[in-house]
Structure formats: C-alpha cells, structure tokens
C-alpha cells in the first residue's frame, strides 16, 4: 500500500492520496475509501505537526495488513517532514511504515517571511494612496502591518478562581495584576513588554479622558491627563504609604507601584456598578523578567488578560475582548482552568464564545491546567486511561489542538522573582514546596511538564529540553514548557498565517482597485461621450483617426515586443550549460573526495580481505591443521571481508554524497552567476528596444499628422513640434528598479533529492538546469518587457491626450471639458500602474508560496 500526504500549512489543508497500481496513478482518498477517518475535518483542516501521530496511527490501522510495509510519500515543507520523520522513526512505527519525501515541496514560512514582508512594505503606500477613504481596508492594512512586525497576541481567558491573574504574572515574572476571586468589572488588561527595564506605563480612560501613568524606577507621575481628580489623588496616597512602609521590598518596588495603581483603577467602578467610568481596555507596558523565555524573546508578545465569564456582571466580556482584539490577528488562545473544574458548563460556554473571535487562531489553542500541584495526579506521568478521560471532556474536545499544559503558576512566578512575593500566602506556599521542584533526590520530586498532553514528537522534544534546564523550578513548574511553545508558535508556526494573510489581503485590494477603475472609467467615458457630441464633425473625426491609428501602432509594437524578447533569449546561447561541464565537475570532485577519504587504500584492504576469505574457505577442505580451526579461520575471514566491504561501500557512498553535493553547489552558483548576467543583458536590451520603438512611434504620429488634410499647415507644425519635443519614458530607471529585486536568487535553487546510492543523475541535472535557466530568463524578459510596455503605454496615452488637447484648443469652448478628460485619463493611468504593481507583488508572493519541484 502506498499513500501520499500533501500538506499546505499556508492554506491549512492536508490531502491524502492512494496509489492505484492498476491504473498507475494517484487516487483521491475520498474516492477510494469513503469511511476513512482521514476524511474527517480534524485530519484535513489542521496544522500537520499537531496531528502527525494520529494520522500515522489511522493509516496503519486502516491500511496495514501485516505483510509489506506501508509506503508513505510526503509533499510539504521541510520542517513538517522533519516532524513526520521523527514520528515514523519510532520503533513500533518504523516496522510497518517506510517514509519518502517527493521532489515537490513548499518553502518553510520562516525562510520566505522576510521577503514577503519586504514586498508588502513596498506596496503598502500604493494601497494607501488608492483606497485611503476605505476605513475597513486601512484597518486591515494596519492589522497586517502589525502582524508582520512580529506582534503576537496571547489571549488568556478562563473563569474566576482559575488562577488566571497569577498565571499572567508568572509569564511577566512579577506580581503586576491584582489577584482576587470576586472582581466585578469587565475590564481587559493589554500588556506589552516595556523597552526599558526600569520603566512602566498604564494607559486608560477615566470619565472619557485619556490618562497615562508613568512609573520610573522608584518614581511615579501622571504623564497624560488631569491630575486634580479623586482617582489620581488616591493613587498618590497609596504609593506614598508603600514608600513609607519599612517592610517594603526595594527590589520589586516598580511592580508594587503598578500593582497598587491597577487595583485602584480597577476598583473605581465598584462605587456604582451601573456607571462605567473606566475604559474597557487598560493598557500596561511593563518589563518582563529576563529569567524567562518571554523576557528574552525577540518576538513582540502582547498579553490580553480577559475577565472571567462565570459572572452576571461580566456577561459582555466576549464582546469587550473581541473589540480589544480588533486590529490584531494570529493570536494564541490560552485557556486557564484546572483539572478539577475543566468539565463544567461555564467552561463549555466560555469556549464557545472564544472560538467565535476571528482574531484568534483556534488551531493553536493552549489549555493550561493551573494549580496542578494541588491536583490529585499520581505517578511520573498520566496513565493512558486518565489522558483519554481528559481529552473526552466536552470543553477539552472543543479546544484541544496545541496541547494541555500542567502548571503551578505560583512556583513558576517564584522561579523568576526568587521567591520575593507581594502576596504573603503565595510566599509561604513557594517556600514550603520549593524543595519538591528543585531537588531531584527528594522522594516527592515534581516535574509537572511530564503530565502535559501534546503531540507525540513535540512532547519528546519538550521533555528533552526541560530535563537539561538550568532553572529547575522554572522547568518543573510547567511554566517553561508553556513559554517555549509560545515562542515556537511565534517563531515558527505564526509565519504561515502571516504570509497567507498578506496574500489574501492583496487579492481583495486588487478586486477593490478594479471596482474603482471601473467607476473612473465610466466617468471618463461619460466625459468623452459629451466631448464627442459637442465637437464639430471635422474635429471629432480628426481625434478619432488619431486615437485609432495610435492604438493600432501600440498593439503592433506590443505584439512584436513579445516575439522579439523570446527570440532574443533563445539566441542567448551562453544561458544553457554543456553537459561536459557537469561531468568535469563530477570527475574533479570525485577524485578529490576519494583522496580525502583514502578510498584507494580502503578498496585495497577490502580486496585483500576478500582474497583472504576465499583462501580460508578453500582451506576448509584439504588444508593443514585442525578442521575446527580451519572452519573458524574461514568464518573470521568472511566476517572481516564483509566488514571491509561494508567499509568500502559506506566510504563510496560518502564520496558519492559529497560529490553530488559539490555538483549541486556548482550548478547553483553557476545558475546564480548566469541569471544575474542575464538580468543585466535583458534589462539593457529592453531599454534599447523600447527606446527605439518609442522613437518609431513618434515618427508614425508625425506621419499621421502630415497626412491629415483637415489640419492647416500651422496646426500640423505645432502638433509635430509637440511630438518631437516630447521625451520618451525612462525605461532604464524601471529596468534598474526591477533588476535590484534579484527575485530569482532564492534559497536552494536546484535542490535535488538524491536516492540511497547518493549518486546524482548528471543527465537529469543537466536537463533540469537548462530548462530552469531558460524558463527563468524568459520570465525575467517577459516581466521586463511588460514593465517597459506599461511605461510606453502611459507615455503614449499622455502624448496622444496632449495632441487631442491641442486639436480641441482649435475649438476654444471645449477646453474645459477636454481638461477634465485629461485629468481623469491621468488618474486612470496612475491607478492602472498602481494596480499592476500590486498584481506584481501578489505574483511575487505566489511565487514564494507555490509548490516547487526539486
């Protein structure tokens, strides 16, 4: 049985094909096995690394018959293949599955993300100029800009008493958020990492006035907002009390100040529950502890602390959260609950509300079983039955994807703040339990991360990473594994969604631009119709003939330009490489690698061992000495011969591999050098070609004017002067602009999958190389030609429009109307140019994200 898995993480789609031996083709699994579990949505619409083990288990269960291994071919990204390879190398799976990677692949998002970000940055001002009046488009534009700047929203939600505030404090590394079981306000804390280690800010609205509190080291001041009000006075009073208290710990004074200020702000609405005086969202900038992964990360995390849902006073929390997340995307949903309370109606209702928020990516939901040190879980890991029971809980079934993490937020927080808690109860708990998390020899040694429920291969890597951590309490509290997965999401997985976001957004912008061009074209057509109706018959005929002949000349030039470009490239004989070049590289490389690996000596020893083995075998019958000794010598000789032969075989394999690598490297470098030369030659040729065509067009226009008997001699001379004095476009500038993109110098240009013998097929490489270099050269030539044609067309329209204006000027009463037409024509030309630039950007992104053949 042979099955193919095709994974596209950009479109969140996994396909399965079954090889049909009878017809020698791949059949869609939907047609071949209607009852397969692989047809279920969670096996089709998911992120492959989170489902790999389940998918392989399903394939084995449904297709393995106890005989030959199942052959699984994979098409997707390299990092997905590595995850799949990890699973398939497990002993129980390796016995029944053989994994192969096809030559069709997608680039890893991390590889292409920078290029797509640059493309978007270049095209963003163009989009803003076209659709500046569309608030939704501009909002989406800013949303993507934020997403491309590595802003990763972490949305923490959960019901009251789940320890949500303590969990967030643990992520930050200090007690910032006030904790308590019965808050009554539906406020959302939006927390960013401060750029300064000794500075914090709080931003909010109080009675519809914007306020910003600034905390600098030990100081506090109102940075924005009126200071003479009850709230500000109360904050000052409380901070003065803290500073005057002799028991105040200087080390975390900044955290204490922020904590107190937030407590006062949050509590101000308790005076009158029916009147909202504080804004729904309170923004906080605070330093993150450098003892944790988030504090050291290059990614820009924004933590959203949402109010609990199981309270009548906070029934609108999902709406408030959705509004707070507007402008964000690609967020990580983090559900904080506990093992004891996970299976409740409140949690099920909460999950339903969260899953409806568009800004959150439900494929990456993290479930946090907080207060895990208080849970009744025994042993070093969960039993199969316990894990199954947890996964079958109603709310867990809805939310499970990235994993379930067992944590103790108090221990995690203490590992970062060195046990210096503001909360006295937390301090006592940390001091009492620290030994269990820090002493591997203690009988109660606790490693909460080992209870985590997550994809097989991801958990293996996680356990290996946690087991060598320097800060044992941080790792064993489970917090380190949570932050590591957040970092993995931000650095690895989120890039796929971001790339797809840009692509889909540009597609929608192009549609919007088309609508606007249609509107402006209709405006122009109306003006032109009005002008033609008012022009006298003679002048109308003159303009119609001029436009018609100019359009005909343009079409002819454009058609000939495409043929000329292809012919020119076909004549660029130096593009293709002679096969003897690769053969020479192979010979030189092979000789060098044989010398470096002492192959002659290895082969000699192998041959000698074979000769000895043959001699010993012959000596068994009729030789001297005891028969047992002769038999033993023969066995040793054969064993040594086999060992030497394997050594020679492995050495030869290594030489072939290095030689193949050298050939590919040489081909890649040759391609890079040749394509750069080709770009320069083509750019220069296109400049020359289109400059000549522009001059020819001017000559044809002059001929048209000369042959027009309805114009006076003075009018003809004036029109000829306009044509002669009109400067052709700067084709060189556009060619250079294109050339700098170096769009074809991307990554592993000629990646070739070498089979077990590690020898490369020179003939196949030669054909692939020549096919690619010619194909890419023609693509470059075609785009350079299209760019030049775009410049020519705009120039031609403006020139003809100027001639038309002058002809109309011979009828003064129509000047105003003609001016309107000219302005609208220029706007449409500019809009069309901008649209082409957006389309080119979209095509470039498609090139990066499309399937490629090695």
Image: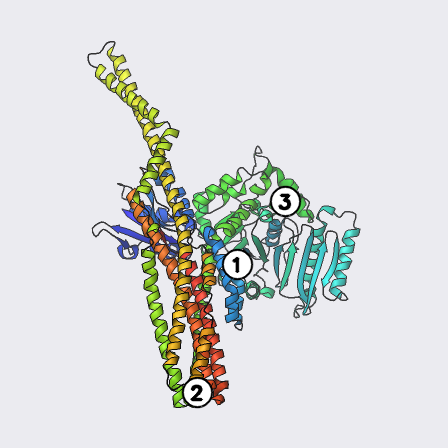
Circle 1: element type: helix
Circle 2: element type: helix
Query: At 66% across and 47% down in the image, what residue appears?
Result: 426
- Colouring scheme applied when the structure was drawn: rainbow
Q: CA distance from mark 2 to mark 1?
A: 48 Å
Which residue does the numbered mark 1 point to in the structure image? Answer: 147
Residue extending farthest to the top is: 625
Q: CA distance from mark 3 to mark 2?
A: 76 Å
Query: At 46% across and 87% down in the image, what residue appears?
Result: 810
Foreground: 737 or 24?
737
Q: Residues within 10 Å of mark 3 (few under 14, many from 20)?
A: many
Q: Residues within 10 Å of mark 2 (few under 14, many from 20)?
A: few
Could you tell whether 748 is left or right of 205 in the image? left
N-terminal label among 2 and 1: 1
Query: At 59% across and 39% down in the image, what residue appears?
Result: 471
Which residue does the numbered mark 2 point to in the structure image? Answer: 530
């Amino acid at each position: 049985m042979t099955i193919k898995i095709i994974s596209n993480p950009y479109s969140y789609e996994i396909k399965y094909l079954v090889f049909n031996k009878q017809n020698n083709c791949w059949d869609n699994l939907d047609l071949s096995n209607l009852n397969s579990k692989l047809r279920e949505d969670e096996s089709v619409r998911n992120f492959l690394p989170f489902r790999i083990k389940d998918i392989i288990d399903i394939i084995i269960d449904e297709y393995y018959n106890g005989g030959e291994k199942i052959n699984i071919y994979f098409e997707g990204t390299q990092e997905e293949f590595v995850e799949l390879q990890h699973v398939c190398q497990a002993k129980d799976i390796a016995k029944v599955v053989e994994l192969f990677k096809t030559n069709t692949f997608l680039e890893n998002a991390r590889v292409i993300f920078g290029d797509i970000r640059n493309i978007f940055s270049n095209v963003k001002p163009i989009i803003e100029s076209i659709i500046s009046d569309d608030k939704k488009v501009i909002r989406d534009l800013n949303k993507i800009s934020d997403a491309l700047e590595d802003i990763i929203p972490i949305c923490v939600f959960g019901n009251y008493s789940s320890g949500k505030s303590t969990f967030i404090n643990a992520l930050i590394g200090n007690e910032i958020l006030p904790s308590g079981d019965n808050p009554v306000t539906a406020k959302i804390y939006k927390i960013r990492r401060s750029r300064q280690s000794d500075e914090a800010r709080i931003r909010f609205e109080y009675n519809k006035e914007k306020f910003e509190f600034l905390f600098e080291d030990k100081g506090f001041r109102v940075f924005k907002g009126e200071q003479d009000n009850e709230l500000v006075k109360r904050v000052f009073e409380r901070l003065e009390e803290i500073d005057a208290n002799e028991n105040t710990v200087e080390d975390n004074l900044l955290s204490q100040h922020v904590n107190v200020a937030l407590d006062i702000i949050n509590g101000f609405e308790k005076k009158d529950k029916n009147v909202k005086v504080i804004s729904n969202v309170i923004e906080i900038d605070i330093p993150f502890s450098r003892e944790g992964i988030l504090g050291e990360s290059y990614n820009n995390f924004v933590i959203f602390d949402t109010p609990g849902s199981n309270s009548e006073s906070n029934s609108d929390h999902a709406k408030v959260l959705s509004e707070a997340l507007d402008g964000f995307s690609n967020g990580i949903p983090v559900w904080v609950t506990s093992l004891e309370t996970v299976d409740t109606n409140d949690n099920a209702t909460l999950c339903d509300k969260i899953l409806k928020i568009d800004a959150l990516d439900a494929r990456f939901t993290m479930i946090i079983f907080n207060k895990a040190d208080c849970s009744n879980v025994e042993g070093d890991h969960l039993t199969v039955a316990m894990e199954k029971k947890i996964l079958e809980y109603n709310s867990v079934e809805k939310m499970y994807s990235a994993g379930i993490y067992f944590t103790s937020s108090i221990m995690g927080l203490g590992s970062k703040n060195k046990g210096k808690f503001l909360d006295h109860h937390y301090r006592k708990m940390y001091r009492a339990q620290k030994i269990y998390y820090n002493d591997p020899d203690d009988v109660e040694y606790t490693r909460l991360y080992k209870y985590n429920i997550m994809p097989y291969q991801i958990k293996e890597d996680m356990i290996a990473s946690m087991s060598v951590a320097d800060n044992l309490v941080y790792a064993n509290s489970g917090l380190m594994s949570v932050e590591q997965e957040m970092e993995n999401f931000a650095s690895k997985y989120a890039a796929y969604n971001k790339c797809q976001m840009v692509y889909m957004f540009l597609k929608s912008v192009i549609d919007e631009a088309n609508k606007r061009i249609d509107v402006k074209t209709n405006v122009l057509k109306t003006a032109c119709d009005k002008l033609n109706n008012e022009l006298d018959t003679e002048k109308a005929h003159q303009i119609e003939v001029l436009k018609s002949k100019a359009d005909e000349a343009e079409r002819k030039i454009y058609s000939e330009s495409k043929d000329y470009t292809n012919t020119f490239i076909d004549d660029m004989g130096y593009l293709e490489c002679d096969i003897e070049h690769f053969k020479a590289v192979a010979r030189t490389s092979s000789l060098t690698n044989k010398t470096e690996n002492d192959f002659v000596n290895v082969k000699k020893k192998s041959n000698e061992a074979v000769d000895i083995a043959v001699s010993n075998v012959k000596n068994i019958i009729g030789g001297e000495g005891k028969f047992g000794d002769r038999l033993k010598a023969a066995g040793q000789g054969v064993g040594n011969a086999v060992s030497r032969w394997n050594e020679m075989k492995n050495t030869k394999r290594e030489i072939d591999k290095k030689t193949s690598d050298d050939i590919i490297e040489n081909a890649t470098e040759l391609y890079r050098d040749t394509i750069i030369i080709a770009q320069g030659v083509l750019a220069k040729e296109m400049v020359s070609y289109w400059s000549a065509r522009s001059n020819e067009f001017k000559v044809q226009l002059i001929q048209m004017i000369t042959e027009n008997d309805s114009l006076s001699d003075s009018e003809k001379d004036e029109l000829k002067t306009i044509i002669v004095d009109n400067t052709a476009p700067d084709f060189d500038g556009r060619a250079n602009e294109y050339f700098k993109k170096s769009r074809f110098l991307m990554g592993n240009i000629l990646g070739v999958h070498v089979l077990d013998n590690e020898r490369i097929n020179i003939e196949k490489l030669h054909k692939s190389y020549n096919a690619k270099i010619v194909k890419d050269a023609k693509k470059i030539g075609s785009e350079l030609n299209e760019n030049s044609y775009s410049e020519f067309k705009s120039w031609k329209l403006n020139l003809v429009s100027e001639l038309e204006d002058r002809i109309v000027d011979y009828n003064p009463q129509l000047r105003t109307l003609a001016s309107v037409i000219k302005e609208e024509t220029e706007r449409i030309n500019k809009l069309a140019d901008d649209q082409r630039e957006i389309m080119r950007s979209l095509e470039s992104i498609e090139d990066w994200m499309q399937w490629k053949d090695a």
